[in-house]
Image (cartoon, helix red, strand yellow):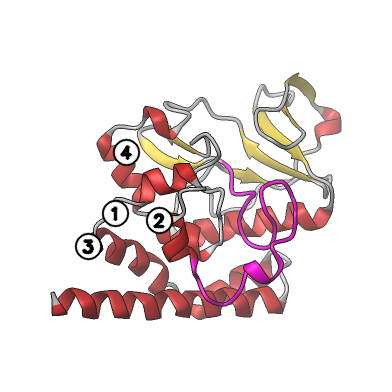
Amino acid sequence: MNDQIERPIDTTTMTRVGGQLGSNCAGIYEDNNGQRYYVKELESPMLAKNEWIAAQLYQLAGAPTLTYIPTVNSNQVATRWEKLDKQSLAQFSADERRQAQQWFAVHAWMANWDAVGLHGDNQGVLNGQVITIDVGGALLFRAYGDPKGKAFGNDVSEIITLRTNQDNRRAYDLFGSMSKLQLIDALSRVSRLSDDAIIHTIQQHGGSDKLAIKMVNRKHSITTQLTTLMQNSNDD
């Protein structure tokens, strides 16, 4: 993603050139310059803002995603259209799977239970780099838009569940085989984030103070789990 926020796009001035690819109502739009965007039509501005903030937090953590573009319509979420090298986990090489595993703790921190996707189609490869294609299942809402409620708390239980819950088959397939050293590396990527940077990112993009505090608390939960894991590794 780019550090600089681009000018919001207006799909009413564009041509729709393709239909939806995921579970949400969406389309591919092309502007007068030939640039294409994938635009999701969500049920409320709250859902759209949630995904936008999630994308900014992924960027803060350094986890690669598609480039999110602001929209005039507050119900929309847009990403710049890209031709992916690979469009699902099933196509990944061993090295690409290891790349994806590096960002495991970011998905857990974000409570993104849909990080890998029902069919492995939320992970892809763009210009040789593994990316998360869609972050709509992160933070306050599930991928289909239902609120997570109390399941999205201060404790990051996803460090365990994303690796052990076989009902979330694709996440289990990708993250279940991670070694202790891989887990330490993954957790460190979240633990080293600045509390102030987390709060600033959320507030800058219209998120609530409550969400900002929760995400700081969840970072500290990961730090605690990282400390325990490192102590156990030393005991071994």
| Residue 126 visible from this viewpoint | no
Looking at the rendered image, the disc whose residue lies closer to the viewer, 1 or 4, is: 1
Distance Cα–Cα, label 3 vs label 2: 15 Å
Measured from the top left, where is residue 158 in percent x and y?
48, 63
Dot 1 or dot 2: first in sequence order is 2
| Residue placed under numbered mark 2 in the picture | 163
Relative to 124, residue 112 above or below:
below
What's drawn in magenta, residue-wise?
134-157
Looking at the rendered image, the disc whose residue lies closer to the viewer, 1 or 3, is: 1
Badge 1: residue crowd in 10 Å (few <14, some 14–19, many ≥20): some
198 or 87, nearer to the observer: 87
Distance Cα–Cα, label 2 vs label 4: 18 Å
Measured from the top left, where is residue 93 in percent x and y?
29, 32
| Residue placed under numbered mark 1 in the picture | 178
Going 79% across and 44% down the picture, which residue do you hit?
42
| Residue placed under numbered mark 3 in the picture | 181
Badge 2: residue crowd in 10 Å (few <14, some 14–19, many ≥20): many
Dot 3 or dot 4: first in sequence order is 4
Q: Judge left or right: residue 145 versus residue 4.
A: right
Looking at the rendered image, the disc whose residue lies closer to the viewer, 3 or 4, is: 3
